[in-house]
Image (tube, rainbow, N blue to C red):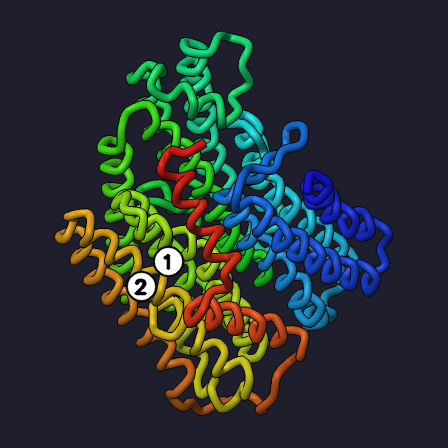
């Protein structure tokens, strides 16, 4: 299994290097194949970490990190396949060869950095990995070379860099806390900090946790440090938007979760859970309100991402094992659902030539595959059965009720319902309402449909009957989040 960890952090570099050769078709195929290989490697870790963590050097995989790794690797594979068809739609560009080369280099490096992050054994290495995701993804947001894309990338760089500066300060405070108990020679690895939890100075840990939630929360998209997210998701190329929403936000939440584990071990559960509940409710409230009146399709999905990150924060804030299990499941199913939604949105934008919701009409009949698949993605994001998000959100709400936080659980249900109304109204207008200028019926590319079919399979499978090994992984992850080493 240690060999698997090494392969995970090296395989995505192969297509990134291949892209520099300028051979577009070879690079596209290599990206798709390497994405599938990384997904297979991540799946192979599922039974291995259900008993104990796997380590080699500075790489470490436990149940929590593998949950987030599954989300990233699935979207990497799906985006690699989708990109074959997506780039065919960009062949009209005068600088197509340069665009495709930069796209493939960036996509693979972005995936590599997000694969590395949950495998880093230590808070300092984790900060470095997430900082790399910022640099690479900012360049990808600006890839289309439009004024709007440049503005979104610049805004993203400013806010994310400020957030990660706060995250670095959190790392420093946690190092100070650890040095008080472990001596100055320790390396911020997770296991020693968790073991020494009760010996850590409380004030330093409280400051570190608050700074981590605010700093990494900037990348997660938590209110009030979410403002970069709608612009970046709207202007990035569609495969990148899917990875930003389904993977990057989750990887950043993974960093918050690691600080949460240490804070619970040092301080007890009350303080860290209260902090996450406050940020989660505020984020969910903001997203629900903004989803009611969105005119841009990709911004609509971006605010849906804020909603789901808020749900995850609330679920961890509930603290009940059932709610934590729901959050870990939510990480994976949200990646599949949001990937499908952005992939479908990309097809709609390509077909209709606009991101404006008012300009997209009769899409269900115009796009015989994408229309229904986009509809199922929206229903999944709205927590409709039989999809996986129904199971995960039901577990989160049930955990909240079971932990005597009935009022917060009720607020969660109300706000999720408001968000559903916003998503459903926009989707109904695009898919079912007729328009005067409807494009010719047909899909732009089968490569853009295939990953959505795979995402649908994942959503139904994890909603109806998750595999036994995956259930064991979630169970072990719940124990780890609860403070077990």
Q: 197 or 234: nearer the eye?
A: 197
**Label 2 belongs to which residue?**
291
Q: Residue at x 34, y 48 (%)?
A: 324
Closest to the observer, 58 or 32? 58
The percent coordinates of residue 405 (x first, y second) are 16, 48
Q: How packed is label 2: few (under 14 Cα within 10 Å), some, or many (20 or more)?
A: many
Where's residue 338, x and y in %? 47, 63
Quadrant in which the C terminus appears: top left
Q: Is residue 160 left or right of residue 197?
A: right
Vertical arrangement, residue 169 with respect to residue 160, above or below: above
- Residue 253's spot in the image, x, y percent? 43, 43
The residue located at (35%, 45%) in the rendering is 222
Residue 390 vertical placement versus 325 (above, below) = below
Do residues under tags 2 and 1 come within 8 Å of each other at their CB atoms? yes
In the rendered image, residue 210, in percent from the top left (x then y), is placed at 32, 29
Helix, strand or loop under label 1 = helix
Question: Which residue is the site of mark 1?
Answer: 303
Q: Earlier in the sequence, mark 2 or mark 1?
A: 2
- C-alpha separation, residue under disc 2 versus residue under disc 1: 6 Å
Q: Which quadrant: the N terminus? A: top right
Residue 76 lies, with reference to residue 476, above or below; the image says: below
Rendered residue at 28%/65% (across/down):
419
54 and 129: which is toward the camera:
54
Question: Does the rendering let one see residue 154?
Answer: no
Position of 294 compared to 342: left or right?
left
Q: Residue furthest front?
A: 51
């Amino acid at each position: 299994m240690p060999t698997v960890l090494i392969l995970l952090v090296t395989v995505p570099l192969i297509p990134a290097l291949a892209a520099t050769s300028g051979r577009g078709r070879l690079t596209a195929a290599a990206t798709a194949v390497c994405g599938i290989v990384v997904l297979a490697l991540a799946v192979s870790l599922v039974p291995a970490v259900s008993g104990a963590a796997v380590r080699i050097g500075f790489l470490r995989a436990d149940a929590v990190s593998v949950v987030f790794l599954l989300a990233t690797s699935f979207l990497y594979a799906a985006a690699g396949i989708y990109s074959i068809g997506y780039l065919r739609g960009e062949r009209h560009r005068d600088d197509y060869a340069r665009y495709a080369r930069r796209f493939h280099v960036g996509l693979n490096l972005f995936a590599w950095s997000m694969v590395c992050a949950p495998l880093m054994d230590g808070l300092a290495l984790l900060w470095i990995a997430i900082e790399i995701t910022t640099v690479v993804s900012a360049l990808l947001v600006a890839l289309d070379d439009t004024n709007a894309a440049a503005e979104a990338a610049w805004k993203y760089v400013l806010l994310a860099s400020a957030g990660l500066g706060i995250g670095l300060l959190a790392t420093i405070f946690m190092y100070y806390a650890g040095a008080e108990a472990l001596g100055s020679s320790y390396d911020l690895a997770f296991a020693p900090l968790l073991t020494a939890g009760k010996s850590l100075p409380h004030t330093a840990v409280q400051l570190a946790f608050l700074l981590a939630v605010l700093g990494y929360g900037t990348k997660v998209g938590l209110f009030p440090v979410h403002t970069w997210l709608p612009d970046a998701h709207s202007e990035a190329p569609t495969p990148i938007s899917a990875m930003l929403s389904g993977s990057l936000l989750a990887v950043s939440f993974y960093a918050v979760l690691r600080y949460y584990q240490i804070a619970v071990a040092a301080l007890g559960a009350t303080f860290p859970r209260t902090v996450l509940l406050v940020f989660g409710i505020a984020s969910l409230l903001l997203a629900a309100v903004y989803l009611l009146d969105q005119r841009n399709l990709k911004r609509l999905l971006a605010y849906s991402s804020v909603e789901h990150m808020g749900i995850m924060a609330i679920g961890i804030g509930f603290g009940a094992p059932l709610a934590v299990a729901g959050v870990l499941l939510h990480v994976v199913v949200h990646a599949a659902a949001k990937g499908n939604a952005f992939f479908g949105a990309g097809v709609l934008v390509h077909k209709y030539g606009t991101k404006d919701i008012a300009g997209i009409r009769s899409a269900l009949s115009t796009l015989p595959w994408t229309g229904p698949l986009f509809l199922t993605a929206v229903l999944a994001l709205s927590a409709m059965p039989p999809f996986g998000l129904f199971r995960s959100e039901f577990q989160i709400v049930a955990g909240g009720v079971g932990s005597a936080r009935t009022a917060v659980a009720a607020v969660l249900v109300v706000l999720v319902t408001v968000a559903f109304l916003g998503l459903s109204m926009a989707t109904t207008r695009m898919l079912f309402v007729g328009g005067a200028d409807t494009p010719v019926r047909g899909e732009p590319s089968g490569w853009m449909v295939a990953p959505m079919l795979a995402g649908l399979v994942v959503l139904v499978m994890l909603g109806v009957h998750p595999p036994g090994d995956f259930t064991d992984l979630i169970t072990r992850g719940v124990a780890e989040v609860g403070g077990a080493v």
